[in-house]
Amino acid sequence: MLEPEMPQIDIRELSPLALAFVGDGVYEVLVRSHIVGRSRLAPGKLHAAAVEYVSARAQFAALAAVGPLLTEAEQAVVLRGRNASKASVAKHASPEEYRASTALECLFGWLYLRGETGRIDALFAAICEAKEAAGA
């Protein structure tokens, strides 16, 4: 995992959407590394495999999988992310799925900016285990 560059401002002052912006990138790198490290997919199929992890519906399921594992502080960050207002919703996702995906990205961004890469790895491992157990 890349080491985070610590922000100049207190991360408690960052909006949930700013945290989600960072978390989206962190989550994408985790997913891509996971797929490439465990398969020999052709380049054209890599994107399709990644979508199975990064779509709003998949991130909704991922958040449900790690929800019971979250600390009180992490739950508070998830709530902030879920309640963040967005002007648009993805066409293949319900508003609930879209809010949950923002919440998951917010959590990963928050953890990354705090330098908690071990926690990120543990939560992502739990997401992968849940996905495999579900047969996806």
Image: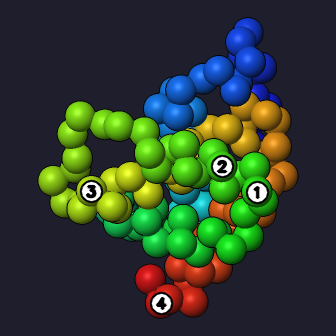
**Residue linked to disc 1:** 72
Q: Are marks 4 and 3 in contact (CB under 8 Å)?
A: no
Alpha carbon distance from label 3 to label 1: 24 Å
Q: Work out whether 127 lies above or below 17.
A: below
Q: Are marks 4 and 2 in contact (CB under 8 Å)?
A: no
Mark toward the viewer: 3 or 1? 1
Q: Work out whether 112 lies above or below 75.
A: above
Q: Work out whether 30 lies above or below 21.
A: below
**Residue linked to disc 2:** 76
**Residue linked to disc 4:** 135
Q: Residues within 10 Å of mark 2 (few under 14, many from 20)?
A: few
Query: Looking at the figure, which quarter contains the C terminus?
Result: bottom left
Mark 4 or 1, nearer chain start: 1
Amino acid carrying mark 1 in the image:
Glu
Alpha carbon distance from label 4 to label 2: 30 Å
Residue at image position (66%, 62%) is: 124
Which residue is at the front of the view, 94 or 21? 94
Mark toward the viewer: 4 or 1? 1
State the image quarter where residue 98 is shown: bottom left
Residue 28 at least partly seen: no
